[in-house]
Amino acid sequence: MAKEKVVLAYSGGLDTSIIIPWLKENYDYEVIAVCGDVGQGKETEGLEEKALKTGASKLYIEDLQEEYVTDFIFPTLKAHAVYEGKYLLGTSHARPCIAKRLVEIALREGATAICHGATGKGNDQVRFELTVKALAPRLKIIAPWRIWEIRSRDDAIDYARERNIPIPVTKEENYSMDRNLWHLSHEGADLEDPWNEPRLDSLLQLMVSPEAAPDSPTYVEIDFERGIPVKIDGQTYAPAALVKKLNAIAGANGVGIDDLVENRLVGMKSRGVYETPGGTVLYAAHRELEYLCLDRQTLHYKEQAAIKFAELVYDGNWYTPLREALSAFVDETQKTVTGTVRLKLYKGSCTPAGAKSPYSLYSEEIATFGRDEVYNQKDSEGFINLFGLPLKVRALMLNENRKGQERL
C-alpha cells in the first residue's frame, strides 16, 4: 500500500531544513518538498540535493516571480495598502502566492496534507492555512512548531547539528529572515529589544545604509498605466524585472529601510526591520500620481479602504470576498491613474520631483495666484454661507439658551 503524501513548504532555511527529518521520524508519510520562488535569489541554489539528502522524495522549485508581482504585489500597490503606516506587506502577500501553488501541487500529487514551518507565535501560520482552507478545505495541515518539543531557534539549531543537516544560520548570527522580490525582513536576536538600534552595516543585504549612499542625488522617472508601473526612465520592463531594477536603484541610495514594532494578528507586538527599496519608491510614485488624478471624494474614501485592505492582506485574508470586492473598487479608481512621476533619491530619502498625466485634474488656470478668467472668487461667499449654516444655527441656539439661563 502506497504511503500517504505530505507537501512541505520548503525554503531550505532553519525551520524547514529540520522539518523533513522530523516528519520522517514521526509520521509514515512520503514528503514532497515545494519551494515557491518569489525572488529569494541564491537561496534556491543547492536546495534539491539538500532536500533529497534529508529525506524528501522530490523537490519542486516553482518560479512564481511574475505571478507574485502581477497578482499580489500590484493589486496591493494599487490599493496603496500599508499596514500600520509603515509595513509594505512583503511577507504578507507572498504567503498566499506560495500557498496557492502548494495546494495545486498537493492536489496534483494526491497528497492528503500540507506542512509549513511557521511558528505558533507568528502571522505566517494564519496566511498559509487560510489559503489552504479557502482553496482546498479537505487537506490536513501539519504545523510542527505547534506540536514538537523544539521550543527555540537554538533548539532547532541543535536538532540540525545532531543530524548533520546544513543550515544557513548560527547561534551567533540568528536572525529570522524572509526574502523575496519585494523585501527582506529581519527579526529576532538583538532586534528583540526595541531599544537596540539596528546594526545596518552588517544587517542590510538589499541596500546600503543612508550614510553609505552617494553624495549626489539620483533622479528616476516611473510611468504608470491604470495604476500599474510599466516603465523606468522611459524603458519598458516586465513586472518582476521592473521591481528588481528599482530595488537596485533605490538600494544604492539607501532608500527603503523601515523599523517597526507591529501588532501581530496573534495578539503580541513584534519588532522587525524591513528592506523594501523598490517598493518604497513605487508607493511614493503611485501616491503622487493619485494626488494628480483622483478627485477628492474618491481619494479620501480610497485612503480609508486602504487601511482595511492592508489588514486583510496582513491577516492572511487574500482569498476572501471582501478582499476581492475591495480590489474591484480599487481597479475602478485606477482607470485614470496613468502618467509619469519623477522622484529624487538621496541618502535614504525619496521625495517627489514632478508628476504629469493626461488625466490630471489639476488646472493651473484655476489654481493660479495670478489673474484668471475662469474662477469667480465672489462665488466662495455663498458657498461658505451654506457650508457654515449648521454652525451658525447652532451658535445662535447656544446664545439664546445662554441668555435664558442668565435671566433665570
Image (cartoon, helix red, strand yellow):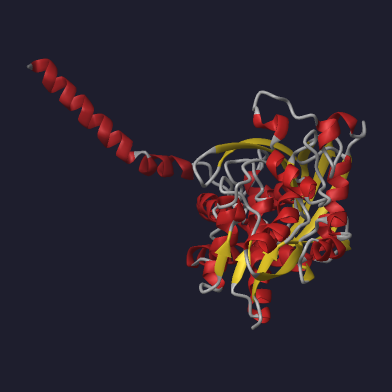
Relative image position of residue 90 (x, y in whole percent): 69, 51
Residue closest to the far bottom? 1
Q: Position of residue 271 (x, y in %)?
A: 64, 35
Q: Residue at x 13, y 16 (%)?
A: 406
Quadrant that contains the N terminus: bottom right
Q: Nearer the viewer, residue 104 or 227?
A: 104
Residue 327 in view (yes/no)? no
Q: 312 or 91, which is in the foreground?
A: 91
- Residue at coordinates 63% horizontally, 61% vertically from top-left? 26
Residue 245 in sight in this render? yes
Q: Furthest residue to the left?
A: 408
Nearer to me, 94 or 298: 94
Residue under the point 21% across and 31% down: 397
Q: Quadrant of residue 192?
A: top right
Answer left or right for 61 relative to 296.
Answer: right
Quadrant holding the C terminus? top left
User: Residue 69 at x, y = what percent?
Assistant: 73, 62
Tell me: 89 left or right of 59.
left
Count numbered badges in the picture: 0
Taking 100 as reference, is 92 above or below it?
above
Q: Is residue 361 above or below residue 187?
A: below
| Residue at figure coordinates x 32%, y 40% from the top left | 389
Say left or right for 67 vs 267: right
- Would you place residue 378 above or below residue 145 in this image? above
Q: Position of residue 181 (x, y in %)?
A: 78, 55
On screen, residue 58 versus residue 193, left or right, reads: right
